[in-house]
Image (cartoon, helix red, strand yellow):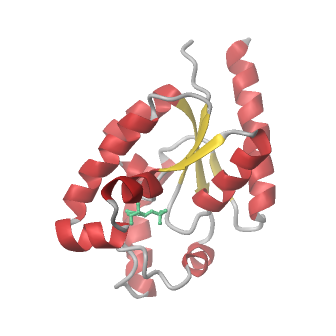
Amino acid sequence: MPIRDNIILTGFMGSGKSTVGDLIANRLGRAFIDTDVKIEEEQNQTISNIFKEKGEEYFRTLEKLAVADICRNNGLVIATGGGTLLNKDNLKIMEQTGIIFCLTASIDIMIDRMGNRKSRPKAAEKNRNAIIELYESRLSGYNNLPNIIDTSEKSASETAELVINLYNKIIEIHSQ
Ligand code: S3P
């Protein structure tokens, strides 16, 4: 059994990946990496600007490179972007290096958590119905992911606790 000890959070925009990831990393004393933040730092540009100037396809290439790079490490807490693990290659790499948790919530809650949406190019220009349409078009992809956690009625802190407990159990089972 290869070491798969990264904790990887994924899910639709507004599912709480970054907030929960940060909490988990703090509690476990691990480093936290957000794929979008890594891309922004390396490109010295916001995700919005990358989409605007170079387009989504270019962003997805950067995302793939970021995933490959991050997955060279162990012992991290990783938050992906909302579309990252809908790509089969990214999913395959991440599965091999960590335990994936897919956060979800009711679509109303996720839209609410997104706030003003300006920094999210896949949601910025869309009204509520168009965001629901995007979510529904991706739903089978998210449902395909392991360890789906509904965070609708949980605080970020409770979700972090739940992920840590589940992670410990999974690691324990794998080490037996
Ligand atoms: C995207 C989600 C964003 C970011 C990019 C594309 C998506 O991340 O990766 O704007 O396709 O769902 P968040 O889910 O962290 O907002």
- In this rendering, the answer to whether 162 lies above or below 119 is above
Q: Quadrant of residue 5?
A: top right
- In this rendering, the answer to whether 92 lies above or below 49 is above
Residue 98: x %, y % from top left = 55, 31
Report whether 80 appears left or right of 30.
left
Q: Quadrant of residue 81?
A: bottom left
Residues 127 and 54: in front is: 54
Residue placed at 81% from the left, 57% from the top? 158
Residues 151 and 113: in front is: 113
Residue 148: x %, y % from top left = 61, 49
Residue 123: x %, y % from top left = 40, 77
Residue 58: x %, y % from top left = 21, 57
* Quadrant into which the C terminus falls: top right
Report whether 34 appears left or right of 160.
left
* Quadrant into which the N terminus falls: top right
Residue placed at 48% from the left, 32% from the top? 95
Residue placed at 20% from the left, 66% from the top? 55
Query: Ligand 1 is in which quadrant of the figure?
Result: bottom left
- In this rendering, the answer to whether 23 lies above or below 2 is below
- In this rendering, the answer to whether 31 lies above or below 55 is above
Report whether 130 appears left or right of 117.
left
How many numbered discs, if any?
Answer: 0
Q: Quadrant of residue 18?
A: bottom right
